[in-house]
Image: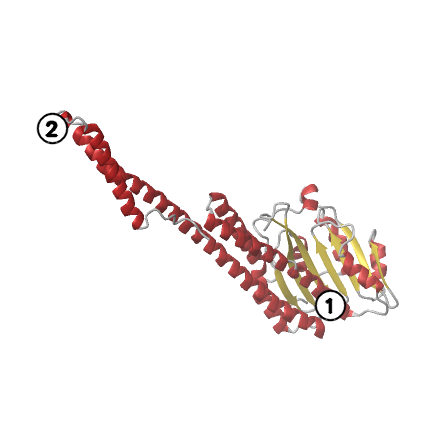
Amino acid sequence: MLQSTPGALSSCRLEERPASLPTALYVSGGRASSQVSVVVFGRERTSAALVRDLNQLQVSRAADVPLWIRVNGLGMPGSLDWLWDALDVPEPLRPLLVDVPQQSRVVSFEGALLVVLHRLGFARDPSHLISSQLGLLLLPGLLITIDEAPSSRPFEALTNWLLRQEGSRDQRDLDDILHYLVDEVLDGIFPMLEQIATRLDDLEASTLRNPKPKLLNRTFQHRSNLRTIRSLIWPLRHQVRIMLRQRQKLLGPEAFRGFQEMGELVDLMFEHIELLRGQCDAITQAYGASVGNRMNQVMKTLTILTSVFAPLTFIAGIYGMNFQIPELHWRYGYFYALVLMALIAMIQLIWLWRRGWFEDWTLFR
């Protein structure tokens, strides 16, 4: 009998996918065909094989040894009902494993531990994110992982390491594998945050030197990516703490300490994201200040031109009036007027130069 907090068993599907489709899912139209494999932790050795029929799975289950069931691809969610029935997966938990996209969660039940995460990465264009859902369910003597993205050799490095190990396995190996997989997904986010931080540093420098609208657009893209990552790890902050307080019996001491470290990792990741979001705000403010500074420089240049030509226009307007002006009969009157206009313009330019008006305020060293 499952005992859970209110709402823990509800299928919290997201309104839209948190990021773009990875290449494998994009090629298959968003739903890849399902492939089931099993890692059997025998008493003498560990073996891995594809599951092609129900009898094969029942034989492994009847051996009363720990099993790691791996499902890759969710092209036919209904076709997996035979798998859930063979493994005695509780009915309320099944939608949480196959509904895509699902909200990230870590939920502890009596005799079950459910984890739903999103494996994130960058597309060919580093400003776009891709994501695939990973569901993990830990039951007594059984670990089920459901990876939305297809793979011919799922979790290859971990599988090869397990196959090389000798000796018997017990339930503690399954909770360690669960923690390892969760830790692997979360650790993959930190390099992404470092790349975003590097790009934001470059954008900040470029914005101060030469602000352009495309720089501001790139900043908004990175901010959107940070908001997506934040929304995926936000639910984990309190859910991990709740799970640790419940003292899940399926977790051994090592796995329990690992989830404690995972809670600290999520907090650190969340703080890092908030710092990067603050840097995005700083770039936006720097862009506005830089554009305003350049606009001031333009207005200053126009003001200089206006102030220089205003007295010259006044002089030209006076001598252009249709009246008898004494200076019109001077032999060198035209020359005197040009010299006077040039002298006034020179005096104004020297005066403005000494006041620092010709300094370029848009240059940053």
Residue bearing the label numbered 2: 326
92 on left or right of 313: right
Q: In which quadrant will I find the N terminus?
A: bottom right
Q: Position of residue 220 (x, y in %)?
A: 50, 49
Percent of width and height locating residue 127: 58, 48
Identify residue for label 1. 176
Q: Three-letter amino acid code at disc 1?
A: Asp
Q: Looking at the image, which residue is at 61% across and 73% down?
A: 245
Res 347 label: none
Q: Position of residue 346 (x, y in %)?
A: 27, 41
The residue located at (20%, 32%) in the rendering is 336
Number of residue marks: 2
Residue that extends furthest to the right in the rendered view of this protein: 44
Q: Secondary structure at mark 2?
A: helix
Q: Nearer the viewer, residue 147 or 61?
A: 147
Residue type, numbered disc 2: Pro
Query: Callout 1 environment at 10 Å: few (<14), some (14 to 19), or many (20+)?
Result: some
What crowding class fits label 2: few (fewer than 14 Cα within 10 Å), some (14-19), or many (20 or more)?
A: few
Q: Secondary structure beneath disc 1? A: helix
